[in-house]
Amino acid sequence: MEKTLRIAVTGPESSGKSSLAMELSKKLNLPLVLEYARIYLEERGPNYKVANVFEMANGQWESWLPFENKSFVADTEFLVYSIWLQERFYTQSEIIEDYIQQQQFDLYLLCKPDIPWEEDPIRENPLDRTYLFKKYETQLTNRKLNFITVNGNLEQRVHQTLSYLEKHFKISFPM
């Protein structure tokens, strides 16, 4: 049986998650599962309610179903939805908590917001990225999830990830 490798890229808005996920998908030759919330909001516009966040979460879960017991790189994960609900709507959700408990990743990559903010019609939080980063870090730590923080430009982030995978997962590939 082939060992699976499931990597989730997480962190605050405009911290390089999508770029890193796409590049790792190419370098590792793994399928990329896109961030469903971005697709949803680009189609419907930036105005949404709590119910829409649950629709997006369900869409994200459904996008992972074809990869059950398979390797992939995820351009988001459910801590994003949990923190999003807490910060935007001051609420928590058992449904989202259930998704967090069910998601199974070998490695979470926490993207540090040390790159410039990129304006985007669906982004909301240009001034609180450091605050949100700390929330992600606390959640990952408290839940005892296997994560590393990646920082710097895209090339540096990819190198940090691949070095970690070589050392801790004994996966080798040309750098």
Image (tube, rainbow, N blue to C red):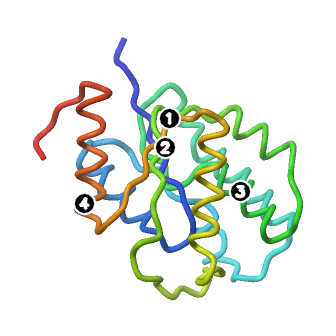
Q: From what the image shows, is residue 167 above or below residue 130?
A: above
Where is residue 98 shown, x and y percent of the image?
78, 37
110 to the left or right of 140:
left
- Alpha carbon distance from label 2 to label 4: 16 Å
Q: From what the image shows, is residue 6 above or below residue 11?
A: above
Please, what is the three-letter code of the amino acid marked with disc 3? Tyr
- Alpha carbon distance from label 2 to label 1: 6 Å
Answer yes or no: do the residues labelled 2 and 4 have beta carbons within 8 Å? no
Answer yes or no: do the residues labelled 4 and 3 have beta carbons within 8 Å? no
32 to the left or right of 160:
right
Residue where numbered disc 2 is placed: 108
- Alpha carbon distance from label 4 to label 3: 27 Å
Answer yes or no: do the residues labelled 3 and 1 have beta carbons within 8 Å? no
Residue where numbered disc 4 is placed: 156
Please, what is the three-letter code of the amino acid marked with disc 1? Asn
Label 1, secondary structure: give it: loop
- Alpha carbon distance from label 3 to label 2: 15 Å
Label 2, secondary structure: give it: strand
- Alpha carbon distance from label 3 to label 1: 19 Å
Answer with mark 4 or mark 3, whichever residue precedes in sequence.
3
Answer with mark 2 or mark 4, whichever residue precedes in sequence.
2
Q: Residue furthest top?
A: 1
Residue where numbered disc 3 is placed: 81
Label 4, secondary structure: give it: helix
Q: From what the image shows, is residue 69 above or below residue 36?
A: above
